[in-house]
Image (cartoon, rainbow, N blue to C red):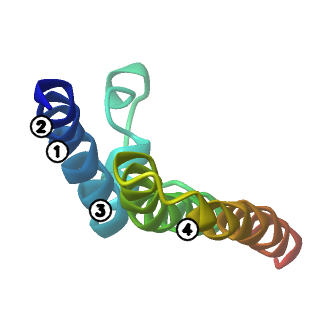
Amino acid sequence: MAEIILFIVLLIPVYLMLLWTYFYPEESILFGEKWRYKGDLEPSEVAVRYTKFVSLLSLIGIPLFVIMFLFELYFLLVAVIALIVIYVLGTMKIFTDD
């Protein structure tokens, strides 16, 4: 029981980081990298879309994955596999639309 509580407590900062990444994708892309360059940096629109897509998918997938293992609901594995398929298709769409 204690390891479950510790696991959930340790996931809170990860979840908060994903929320920050979704709402501020430009800042999260450049986090820790601004010191390397002169002037203003601006990530491409594709990079911003990809960052928001991956963070949103992670915000949905992580709780689903945790619930699946905490309550041993292995039928949710189908939903996890569906998220992987959505990730692949979404990534292909993001990088092929210009």
Gap in Å between the C-alphas at discs 1 and 3?
Answer: 18 Å
Q: Secondary structure at mark 4?
A: helix
Which amino acid type is shown beneath numbered disc 3? Tyr
In the image, taking residue 90 as reference, residue 80 lies left or right, namely left
Residue 80 is labelled as none
Which amino acid type is shown beneath numbered disc 4? Phe
Is residue 2 at all visible to an observer of this figure?
yes
Q: 10 Å neighbourhood of mark 2: few (<14), some, or many (≥20)?
A: few
Q: 10 Å neighbourhood of mark 4: few (<14), some, or many (≥20)?
A: some
Instruction: Give whichever of discs 2 and 3 has the lower sequence position.
Output: 2
Which mark is in front, 4 or 3? 4
Gap in Å between the C-alphas at discs 1 and 2?
Answer: 5 Å
Point 72% across, 72% down: residue: 86
Instruction: Give whichever of discs 4 and 1 has the lower sequence position.
Output: 1
Q: Is residue 78 above or below residue 40?
A: below
Q: Secondary structure at mark 2?
A: helix
Which residue position holds label 1?
12
Q: Work out which quarter of the rendered image holds the C terminus and state it.
A: bottom right
Which residue position holds label 3?
24
Q: 10 Å neighbourhood of mark 3: few (<14), some, or many (≥20)?
A: some
Which residue position holds label 2?
9
In the image, taking residue 9 as reference, residue 89 lies left or right, namely right
Is the C-beta separation of discs 1 and 2 under 8 Å?
A: yes
Gap in Å between the C-alphas at discs 4 and 2?
Answer: 25 Å
Gap in Å between the C-alphas at discs 4 and 3?
Answer: 12 Å
Point 85% across, 67% down: residue: 92
Residue 53 is labelled as 4
Locate residue 94, reporting x and y percent.
75, 71
Instruction: Give whichever of discs 4 and 3 has the lower sequence position.
Output: 3
Is the C-beta separation of discs 4 and 2 under 8 Å?
A: no
